[in-house]
Amino acid sequence: MAAGEPGAAAAAAAAAAALSVSAGARADALRPVVVFSVAADSVPLVAAIATLFDAYRVALLAHGVPIDSFQGFAGEIASLPGPYAEPDGAMLIAVDVEGGGGAGAAVAVAGAATPLPAGVPPRWDGRGTPVGCIALKPLKAAGGVRTCEAKRLYVRPECRGRGAARALSLAVTEFARAAGYHRMVLDTLHRLEGALPLYASLGFTACEAYCFNPMPDVVFMELWLRPRSASAGSVAVGGRDHAGGGVCTDGAGGVGGAGSNDAAGMSHPAGSGADVRADDGIRAAARAGVEAGAGAGAGAAAVGRSASAEPEPAAAAVAAGGV
């Protein structure tokens, strides 16, 4: 076919369009993602979190997780902020600050000029495109050990690979540490392949069950936010050891605030074979996926391809924040 024929011209145009799309995708991947906190009293901004929560719910249902049957997720979305209200809880959102969309024009946030407590990301004003979320809720303390639970980590499929899941996880961990929590827990599933490498890289390890979760491949994990005493069941706080069982029950009576708490029925003794096998699986996943410890402790909430070069597994972005 001669170069001047219509078919050649169409092929050239298609190739040029493909290159343009590829260049656009690379530009999107390089745009920074910034983590903000969401004010619980701002209706349009909480609505943006609710939209992400609902997308997360749909993704879990697609993975065969009947999330509404044992966590009442739909009701949780309708009643936000619920257990995620500050100062003991948090709702964080990852935003493409250079993208369009969001809540539209800047939204007036009450008290926006008031300095935020240490560890709390800047308030989101509604500008930019929301790409992901994570939340934090308090659990009932046991033996002086303050425990919180990381929940609802989700990144939109088209926005994965930009480090948003890691940035959200780091930000919520920093929030919890600054809020005075001793320990953070979460639950996830083996079927969500990217979850275990992500959490292992942040220092989480397997722990016994702390709440009811009927899924057969559930994994419970914990991260100690403050130095833990060498003696079993205690945590060093301000130079003093406070005895504690280390396992806290959910004050809401179940994961996500619905259903009965069944920690006793699902827990395994510390150091049991189940915990050892889970830890072995987590370590293997970490070796196969994200390098353990990569980026841990970094407090930066803004990340881009240059600051977070590790791949972000799609499954981790779906539900790594706990079922």
Image (tube, rainbow, N blue to C red):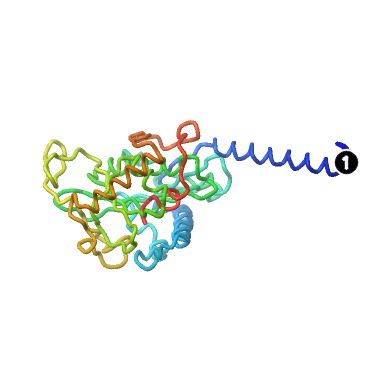
Query: Which residue is depicted at the point 39% across and 59% down?
Result: 80
Query: Which residue is depicted at the point 30% across and 67% down?
Result: 259
Percent position (x, y) of residue 319? 41, 53
Does residue 113 appear anywhere in the picture? no
Task: Count up the numbered dots.
Answer: 1
Q: Quadrant of residue 124?
A: top left
Percent position (x, y) of residue 100? 58, 45
Q: Quadrant of residue 189?
A: bottom left
Query: Which residue is depicted at the point 64% across and 36% down?
Result: 23
* Amino acid type of the residue that numbered disc 1 sits on in the rendered structure: Glu
Image quadrant holding the N terminus, namely top right
| Farthest residue, direction top | 306
Q: Assign a secondary structure to mark 1.
A: loop
Query: Which residue is depicted at the point 11% across and 47% down?
Result: 243
For residue 251, above or below residue 228: below
Percent position (x, y) of residue 91? 38, 50
Q: Which residue is mark 1?
A: 5
Percent position (x, y) of residue 235? 16, 43
Q: Nearer the viewer, residue 308 or 198?
A: 198
Does residue 320 appear anywhere in the picture? yes
Image quadrant holding the C terminus, namely bottom left
Left or right: 274 as drawn, with respect to 104: left
